[in-house]
Amino acid sequence: MLAPVNVSLESLNLMTLAPMLIPIIGALVILVIDMLKSKLDRSLYVVLSLLFLIMDFSTIIDSSSIFMKDGTLMGVFDVMLIDGLAILSQFIIVGASILFIPLALSHKRFHEFAYPEFFALFLFMIGGFQFMVATDNLILVFVGLETSSLALYTLIAMHNRDKSFEAAVKYFTMGALAAGLYSFGAMVFYALTGSVEISKIAAVLAANGYADLAYVLIGVVFMLAAFAFKLSLVPFHTWAPDVYEGSSAAMAGYMSIVPKIAAFVVAMRLFEFLIHSGVVWLEIVLYIFVIVTMTAANIWALVQTDVKRMLAYSSVSHAGFVMAAILIGTTQSNSALFLYWILFSFTNLGSFSMLWLSRQKHLPAHQNSDHSYDKFAGMIKTSPIAATIMGVFMLSLAGIPPFALFWGKVYLISSAVTSGYTVLALIMALNSAIAGYYYVKLIVYMFMKEPIIGNDGHMYVANATKPLRTIIGIAAIGTIFAFLAINPLLEFITSFVYNSGY
Amino acid sequence: MLDHILSILIFFPAIAGVFGFMIQKDSVRAYGVAVATIEFALSLWLWFSFDSNVSGMQFMEQLPLVPAFGINYILGVDGISLFIIILAAFFTMIGIASLTETKDVKNMIISLLFLQMTMVGVFAALDAIVFYIFWELSLVPMLYIIGAWGGPLRIYASVKFFLYTFAGSLVMLVGMLFMAYFYFQATGVWSFAILEWYRLILPENFQLWLFAAFFVGFAIKVPMFPFHTWLPYAHGQAPTIGSVILAAILLKMGTYAFIRFSLPMFPDASAFFMFPIAILAIIMIVYTAMVAYAQEDVKQVVAYSSVSHMGVIILGTFALNVEGISGSIFLMIAHGVVSGALFLLVGVIYDRRHTKMMNQFGGLASVMPRYATIFGLMLMASVGMPLTINFVGEFLSLLGFYKQSHVLTILAGTAIIVGAIYMLAAYKKMFFGTVTIEENKNLPDVNKRELLALVPLAIITVWLGVYPNPVLAPINKSVESIVQLMHDKSITEEAKSRIPNLVHGIEITRTTVEEAH
């Protein structure tokens, strides 16, 4: 006879679910509203989503204060794991989403924002990402990953252009492949250790002294490939530029930040213990990944003729740069990862929003793509403020001090220096110099070339509305005045990362 | 107010630049001149309140910026940086005042004001990261000035300038991070404060590597042979004001950084690399002098001669003794005044004829006598005639290096004579003979605005050539303390013998104590 299972409700710590449930409830509310009364304006859905996201954000603040008091919290049969990494990455995920969603209120009406489903899917996606980072259970990671990815594919396709369908299908196929690789890798680890929880996997492997190293390596290979797809590491990056080109600029900016931080956190949880337990092979492969991703993506970015594709390759390169933090694997480097990504969110979201601001509904004859370099020629003459802001974003991406990304770069390179990766530090520095070229190229077009005849500067702000300007303003202020916020951010992040044992 | 005079000096032009956006286009030049004059007056006030008897840092300011990572906003001036700051303020002032009709003059003046912020910032910063911030930031306005107002190849030149220097300084940044890490290992706290770094004694092989990392950044900026290839393009394409600021101030960042960072932080490495760098410097002096002789374009002659003289500055710096270093700092100022003036002069003729080719001129002395006189004076100063400003610096630099190596100094000395040849040849082509080209016959002589910029420079050239003491004394004072620090810090025998010990009294008492034991 089976003994009755008694689980007290307190021990479940259901509060750990609150941050993820809020966007999901929000998504359901939006669907219900649509069912009751259709044809409502997009502004309603934007504001509703914003409200739910702000609520979400405040519950994360709550859990961060609990974390500061009591340390890591487990919940729901120890599936949920609310540690510093989970909280920090949720801050980034939800914060970037709050900055993203007002971009839907563009001046021109675009197809996708007319559907309430867009906003519902968007909130589901955020819920998925939050689950993904707040657990060390490989199955829940998988569930979160798929929830968010499937929602994201649809969001891209809803942009409703030929290129968007191409992008969505491409992303979907690649994503499906990555999901397959991931589940296979998880299966190998389960077969080896009898557990799907990363901490237990680590404990079992350590206990038997990595006796079955060959099998561990097979698992690692699959996992690595899966994450390389998600993080767009070279050579698994091929989808990234096409997908970025196909989706709207705002969506592309969002994709360069949020899905990646979620993947970074899972990669950090999984690879950290493997690197530290001396799986030398993994270290070498990661090293190669990091260097190849940084360098190759930079070189491809040099030859792009479209600003959005350039920014796509630059995001790939930045992902490689940050991957170095996981390779180095010290508290300082992991803190640097979060610092870098927070600063990167501001700058990158800002620069993609600038592209979004200048998005025309129909391409003029002399333009081959939405955001070709030529389009920005002589921008300083016609709309100087927009040109200056865009210039600041580019300088920040290039790592010119005192703009935001410089501090992330310094701290990350310093973490490489302190852990003895001298060559890596030099390569990272020199790659920043290569990257300087294509960022400066846009500045050259904006500031030093003559505008195309007939360009009265209106097209740079064709899509501008108050919400868009506000978001760009926030991003610009965050980029320029980052130096004031570095110290509190750094202390906050370091204490969270350190107290989570990374 | 004196407590924060350095911050005011740094940020006043920048804030004024931001407000400059609000000013109507036709009035912006007067605004620029006013701001730059106030800034120059402030810098003179700084000199006035500067205590020449103190060798250390004065007017220090400190504010935490990222204390968790040891980054603080620390400022201070000593005799070494004081005069370069004044020079920067001076050149921005006369640069804006002498600005001829340009398109988008508002953007130009605002860029110049931002550039001034970065220039003063570099020379006043006493924290490596703050230094680096201004160092890198100075590239941006210069990129814009060359790229937007330059000649036909301006975009190529500006991007080359930017990328070359940017790549070099990133290597330097890695060096700085290593230095901070070594400091952290030694003391347990992160710090990027330069004065704290001075106290750190590193093993020789660390010094060599770090010296090399910093060297890449500084040498590209100077620019030292073989990293000089960006400079002729930058000078060739830049508008007059860009060349003036570049030659007078921006290049000095590199040589200044050698004295501020490399020498006191890595004395053994400096002694180790003394001869290789001296040989590079001499190649730089001789080679660029020869290249200058072959130029058709008068601006390129001035540009290459400017590089050639930067070689003498490097040579003086790496003499590692008080005469050499003081001489090189004095020469930095002299070179700033003289080459800045020469570029202004080239600008004067370019405005009139829109060409810089020397074969387009000839006999100008009879058409533009005042112009020819000032040009002649500056040219004499440039070749190092006694009683002009350059002579003092060159003489001291060479004297300093003579103590280290006779042969190399004689080589460098001969190279300076080559300098006289190409400069005089250029002068002959432009000013002597008869006027052969019709257009040159009615050229107007220098006007009031140009005189306003050139006459003060001519006065300084002669004044400091005859009586250099007001500038040289404070420089000397600060250099003495740096040389003493280097001697005390050095660990190898070679460095101890190369770097003189200035405090004989203490040495004697120490030996007597030992004898007593």
Image (spheres, coloured by chain):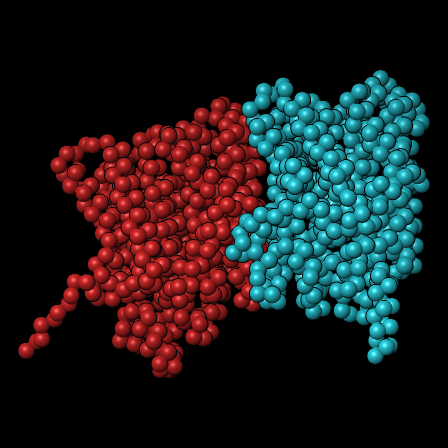
Chain B representation colour: cyan
Q: Residue furthest left?
A: A1
Q: Which chain is red?
A: A
- Is residue A252 visible in this depiction of the protein? yes
Q: In this image, A176 relative to B94: left or right?
A: left
- Is residue A364 visible in this depiction of the protein? no
Of residue B191 and residue A466, the one placed in the foreground of this image is B191
Of residue B109 and residue A501, the one placed in the foreground of this image is A501
Q: Residue at x 88, y 60 (%)?
A: B404
Q: Residue at x 74, y 29 (%)?
A: B94
Q: Residue furthest top?
A: B442
Q: Position of residue A376 (x, y in %)?
A: 50, 33
Q: Position of residue B293 (x, y in %)?
A: 86, 42
Q: In this image, B310 relative to A492: left or right?
A: right
Quadrant holding the C terminus of chain B: bottom right
Q: Position of residue A406 (x, y in %)?
A: 53, 49
Q: Residue at x 12, y 69 (%)?
A: A6
